[in-house]
Image: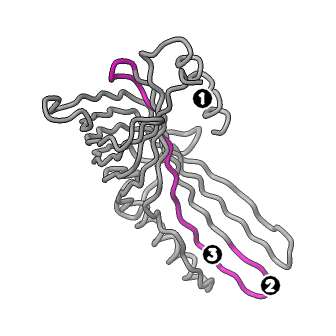
Amino acid sequence: MKKLFVIIFIISLALKVHSDAYDFRMKIGYITFNMKHLKELQNEILEDINSIGIQSKKFGNYSNTLSYQIQFLRKKTGFFYEFASTGSRIDYRDYSGNYTFDQILNKHAIGFHGEHNPIPQFTDNLIQYIQIAYTFTTLDYKERVKVFGENLADSSTLFYSKGGSLELGVSYKLLEEPILVMFDVGGSVAYSQAFYLKGNSDAQLSTEENLVNPTWSGFKVGFTFSYDFKKF
Protein backbone atom coordinates (compact mmCIF):
# COMPACT_ATOMS: atom_id res chain seq x y z
CA MET A 1 0.00 0.00 0.00
CA LYS A 2 2.80 2.44 0.89
CA LYS A 3 4.52 1.71 -2.45
CA LEU A 4 1.30 2.50 -4.32
CA PHE A 5 0.95 5.91 -2.67
CA VAL A 6 4.62 6.73 -3.37
CA ILE A 7 4.22 5.84 -7.06
CA ILE A 8 1.06 7.91 -7.39
CA PHE A 9 2.68 10.85 -5.61
CA ILE A 10 5.64 10.79 -8.02
CA ILE A 11 3.30 10.64 -11.02
CA SER A 12 1.34 13.59 -9.64
CA LEU A 13 4.53 15.64 -9.35
CA ALA A 14 5.32 14.93 -13.01
CA LEU A 15 1.83 15.98 -14.08
CA LYS A 16 2.06 19.20 -12.10
CA VAL A 17 5.40 20.05 -13.62
CA HIS A 18 4.18 19.63 -17.18
CA SER A 19 0.70 21.07 -17.10
CA ASP A 20 -1.54 23.36 -15.09
CA ALA A 21 -4.55 21.48 -16.47
CA TYR A 22 -3.97 18.51 -14.16
CA ASP A 23 -5.07 18.57 -10.55
CA PHE A 24 -3.83 16.10 -7.92
CA ARG A 25 -5.75 15.94 -4.65
CA MET A 26 -5.72 14.03 -1.40
CA LYS A 27 -8.91 13.48 0.57
CA ILE A 28 -9.50 12.13 4.07
CA GLY A 29 -12.97 11.46 5.40
CA TYR A 30 -14.92 9.81 8.18
CA ILE A 31 -17.33 7.23 6.75
CA THR A 32 -20.33 5.45 8.22
CA PHE A 33 -21.72 2.08 7.15
CA ASN A 34 -23.77 -0.86 8.41
CA MET A 35 -21.96 -4.20 8.25
CA LYS A 36 -25.10 -6.07 9.31
CA HIS A 37 -24.22 -9.53 7.97
CA LEU A 38 -20.63 -9.37 9.19
CA LYS A 39 -21.82 -8.43 12.68
CA GLU A 40 -24.32 -11.30 12.63
CA LEU A 41 -21.57 -13.71 11.62
CA GLN A 42 -19.28 -12.41 14.35
CA ASN A 43 -22.02 -12.97 16.97
CA GLU A 44 -22.52 -16.55 15.75
CA ILE A 45 -18.77 -17.22 15.95
CA LEU A 46 -18.62 -15.72 19.45
CA GLU A 47 -21.53 -17.90 20.60
CA ASP A 48 -19.84 -21.02 19.19
CA ILE A 49 -16.58 -20.20 20.98
CA ASN A 50 -18.32 -19.46 24.27
CA SER A 51 -20.36 -22.66 24.01
CA ILE A 52 -17.21 -24.75 24.45
CA GLY A 53 -16.29 -22.97 27.65
CA ILE A 54 -14.02 -20.22 26.30
CA GLN A 55 -15.68 -17.03 27.55
CA SER A 56 -14.36 -14.58 24.98
CA LYS A 57 -15.06 -10.91 24.40
CA LYS A 58 -15.42 -8.97 21.17
CA PHE A 59 -13.83 -5.63 20.34
CA GLY A 60 -14.26 -3.19 17.48
CA ASN A 61 -17.35 -4.71 15.89
CA TYR A 62 -16.72 -3.21 12.42
CA SER A 63 -16.75 0.39 13.64
CA ASN A 64 -17.09 3.42 11.38
CA THR A 65 -13.67 4.50 10.20
CA LEU A 66 -11.55 6.88 8.13
CA SER A 67 -11.14 6.65 4.37
CA TYR A 68 -8.17 7.88 2.33
CA GLN A 69 -8.53 9.00 -1.26
CA ILE A 70 -6.30 10.33 -4.02
CA GLN A 71 -7.67 12.04 -7.11
CA PHE A 72 -6.27 12.88 -10.57
CA LEU A 73 -8.45 15.44 -12.33
CA ARG A 74 -8.26 17.28 -15.63
CA LYS A 75 -10.84 19.97 -16.33
CA LYS A 76 -13.01 18.83 -13.39
CA THR A 77 -13.13 15.15 -14.35
CA GLY A 78 -10.76 12.28 -13.70
CA PHE A 79 -10.26 9.19 -11.62
CA PHE A 80 -9.64 8.34 -7.99
CA TYR A 81 -8.47 5.57 -5.69
CA GLU A 82 -9.83 5.07 -2.17
CA PHE A 83 -8.83 2.87 0.75
CA ALA A 84 -10.64 2.19 4.04
CA SER A 85 -10.12 -0.38 6.76
CA THR A 86 -12.14 -1.61 9.73
CA GLY A 87 -12.67 -4.89 11.53
CA SER A 88 -13.33 -6.71 14.74
CA ARG A 89 -11.62 -8.94 17.29
CA ILE A 90 -12.64 -11.84 19.51
CA ASP A 91 -10.22 -12.30 22.38
CA TYR A 92 -9.78 -14.62 25.37
CA ARG A 93 -6.99 -14.43 27.95
CA ASP A 94 -6.11 -16.20 31.18
CA TYR A 95 -2.99 -17.07 33.17
CA SER A 96 -1.91 -19.74 30.68
CA GLY A 97 -2.16 -17.75 27.45
CA ASN A 98 -4.58 -16.24 24.99
CA TYR A 99 -6.75 -16.89 21.94
CA THR A 100 -7.21 -14.09 19.37
CA PHE A 101 -9.48 -14.08 16.33
CA ASP A 102 -9.02 -10.95 14.19
CA GLN A 103 -11.35 -10.03 11.32
CA ILE A 104 -9.69 -7.38 9.14
CA LEU A 105 -11.85 -5.72 6.48
CA ASN A 106 -10.16 -3.65 3.75
CA LYS A 107 -11.91 -1.72 0.99
CA HIS A 108 -10.26 -0.69 -2.28
CA ALA A 109 -12.16 1.46 -4.77
CA ILE A 110 -11.16 2.92 -8.11
CA GLY A 111 -13.39 4.92 -10.38
CA PHE A 112 -14.57 8.13 -12.05
CA HIS A 113 -14.84 11.54 -10.38
CA GLY A 114 -16.72 14.49 -11.87
CA GLU A 115 -17.62 17.89 -10.44
CA HIS A 116 -19.14 21.25 -11.31
CA ASN A 117 -20.28 24.49 -9.72
CA PRO A 118 -24.12 24.49 -9.64
CA ILE A 119 -24.45 28.25 -8.92
CA PRO A 120 -21.47 30.08 -10.49
CA GLN A 121 -23.45 33.32 -10.62
CA PHE A 122 -23.50 33.44 -6.81
CA THR A 123 -20.28 31.79 -5.64
CA ASP A 124 -17.15 30.08 -6.88
CA ASN A 125 -16.71 28.12 -3.67
CA LEU A 126 -19.50 25.53 -3.92
CA ILE A 127 -18.93 22.29 -5.85
CA GLN A 128 -21.18 19.32 -6.53
CA TYR A 129 -19.45 16.02 -7.19
CA ILE A 130 -20.22 12.49 -8.30
CA GLN A 131 -18.07 9.37 -7.92
CA ILE A 132 -18.74 6.02 -9.61
CA ALA A 133 -16.44 3.23 -8.52
CA TYR A 134 -15.55 -0.43 -8.77
CA THR A 135 -14.95 -1.81 -5.27
CA PHE A 136 -12.83 -4.74 -4.15
CA THR A 137 -13.10 -5.81 -0.50
CA THR A 138 -10.92 -8.28 1.37
CA LEU A 139 -11.79 -10.01 4.65
CA ASP A 140 -8.85 -11.58 6.43
CA TYR A 141 -9.56 -14.04 9.27
CA LYS A 142 -6.50 -14.41 11.52
CA GLU A 143 -6.47 -16.88 14.41
CA ARG A 144 -3.68 -17.14 16.97
CA VAL A 145 -3.32 -19.39 20.01
CA LYS A 146 -0.51 -18.85 22.53
CA VAL A 147 0.00 -21.02 25.64
CA PHE A 148 2.69 -20.27 28.21
CA GLY A 149 4.43 -18.00 25.71
CA GLU A 150 4.49 -20.58 22.91
CA ASN A 151 2.59 -20.13 19.63
CA LEU A 152 0.46 -23.23 19.09
CA ALA A 153 -1.54 -21.92 16.12
CA ASP A 154 -1.29 -19.00 13.71
CA SER A 155 -3.54 -19.16 10.64
CA SER A 156 -4.99 -16.77 8.07
CA THR A 157 -7.98 -17.25 5.74
CA LEU A 158 -8.71 -14.67 3.04
CA PHE A 159 -12.09 -13.87 1.45
CA TYR A 160 -12.86 -11.55 -1.47
CA SER A 161 -15.89 -9.51 -2.52
CA LYS A 162 -16.42 -7.37 -5.64
CA GLY A 163 -18.96 -4.65 -6.21
CA GLY A 164 -19.67 -1.05 -7.12
CA SER A 165 -20.69 2.24 -5.56
CA LEU A 166 -22.22 5.61 -6.38
CA GLU A 167 -21.44 8.66 -4.24
CA LEU A 168 -23.00 12.13 -4.50
CA GLY A 169 -21.91 15.09 -2.44
CA VAL A 170 -20.96 18.72 -2.15
CA SER A 171 -17.67 20.44 -1.35
CA TYR A 172 -17.05 23.96 -0.13
CA LYS A 173 -13.74 25.77 -0.63
CA LEU A 174 -12.37 26.97 2.70
CA LEU A 175 -8.99 28.10 1.37
CA GLU A 176 -7.38 28.47 -2.07
CA GLU A 177 -3.92 29.91 -1.31
CA PRO A 178 -1.29 28.59 -0.73
CA ILE A 179 -3.15 25.26 -0.76
CA LEU A 180 -6.67 24.33 -1.75
CA VAL A 181 -8.73 23.10 1.22
CA MET A 182 -12.32 21.92 0.79
CA PHE A 183 -14.88 20.65 3.27
CA ASP A 184 -16.82 17.67 1.87
CA VAL A 185 -20.15 16.06 2.73
CA GLY A 186 -21.55 13.12 0.76
CA GLY A 187 -23.56 9.94 0.76
CA SER A 188 -23.04 6.69 -1.10
CA VAL A 189 -25.01 3.67 -2.23
CA ALA A 190 -22.97 0.50 -2.66
CA TYR A 191 -23.50 -3.08 -3.75
CA SER A 192 -21.15 -5.99 -3.10
CA GLN A 193 -21.40 -9.69 -3.84
CA ALA A 194 -21.07 -12.31 -1.10
CA PHE A 195 -17.59 -13.02 0.20
CA TYR A 196 -15.92 -16.00 -1.44
CA LEU A 197 -12.82 -17.92 -0.45
CA LYS A 198 -9.58 -16.97 -2.17
CA GLY A 199 -8.97 -19.54 -4.90
CA ASN A 200 -12.50 -20.99 -4.73
CA SER A 201 -15.33 -18.67 -5.78
CA ASP A 202 -17.92 -21.38 -5.03
CA ALA A 203 -17.04 -21.38 -1.31
CA GLN A 204 -19.09 -18.43 -0.04
CA LEU A 205 -19.21 -17.02 3.46
CA SER A 206 -22.59 -17.23 5.19
CA THR A 207 -24.43 -17.03 8.47
CA GLU A 208 -27.13 -19.54 9.40
CA GLU A 209 -29.63 -17.53 7.33
CA ASN A 210 -27.81 -15.27 4.86
CA LEU A 211 -24.82 -14.98 2.60
CA VAL A 212 -22.34 -12.47 4.01
CA ASN A 213 -21.35 -9.38 2.04
CA PRO A 214 -19.90 -5.98 3.01
CA THR A 215 -22.34 -3.06 3.04
CA TRP A 216 -20.38 0.14 2.40
CA SER A 217 -23.44 2.36 1.85
CA GLY A 218 -23.43 5.35 4.18
CA PHE A 219 -22.34 8.92 4.73
CA LYS A 220 -18.99 10.66 4.52
CA VAL A 221 -17.63 13.92 5.89
CA GLY A 222 -14.08 15.11 5.40
CA PHE A 223 -11.53 17.42 3.80
CA THR A 224 -9.81 17.59 0.42
CA PHE A 225 -6.34 19.09 -0.04
CA SER A 226 -4.43 20.15 -3.16
CA TYR A 227 -1.16 22.02 -3.66
CA ASP A 228 0.07 23.72 -6.82
CA PHE A 229 3.57 22.29 -7.29
CA LYS A 230 4.16 24.86 -10.04
CA LYS A 231 4.95 27.31 -7.26
CA PHE A 232 8.23 25.54 -6.37
Please tell me the numbered disc located at residue 154. none
Which of marks 2 and 3 precedes in the sequence?
A: 3
The spot of residue 47 in percent (x, y) is: 50, 78
Question: How packed is label 3: few (under 14 Cα within 10 Å), some, or many (20 or more)?
Answer: some
Which residue bears the numbered disc 2?
A: 96
Q: Which residues are magenta?
A: 74-99
Which residue bears the numbered disc 3?
A: 91
Between tags 1 and 3, which lies in front?
1
The spot of residue 126 in percent (x, y) is: 24, 38
Helix, strand or loop: magenta stretch: strand
**Considering only vertical position in the picture, is 80 above or below 92?**
above
CA–CA distance in space, label 1 to label 2? 48 Å
**Considering only vertical position in the picture, is 8 above or below 55?**
above
Residue in the foreground of this view, choosing between 203 and 121? 121
The spot of residue 1 in percent (x, y) is: 63, 39
Which of marks 3 and 1 precedes in the sequence?
A: 1
Q: Are marks 1 and 2 in contact (CB under 8 Å)?
A: no
Is residue 114 visible to the viewer in this orientation of the structure?
yes
Residue at horizontal 42 percent and vertical 62 percent from the top: 207
Which residue bears the numbered disc 1?
A: 9
Q: Secondary structure at mark 1?
A: helix
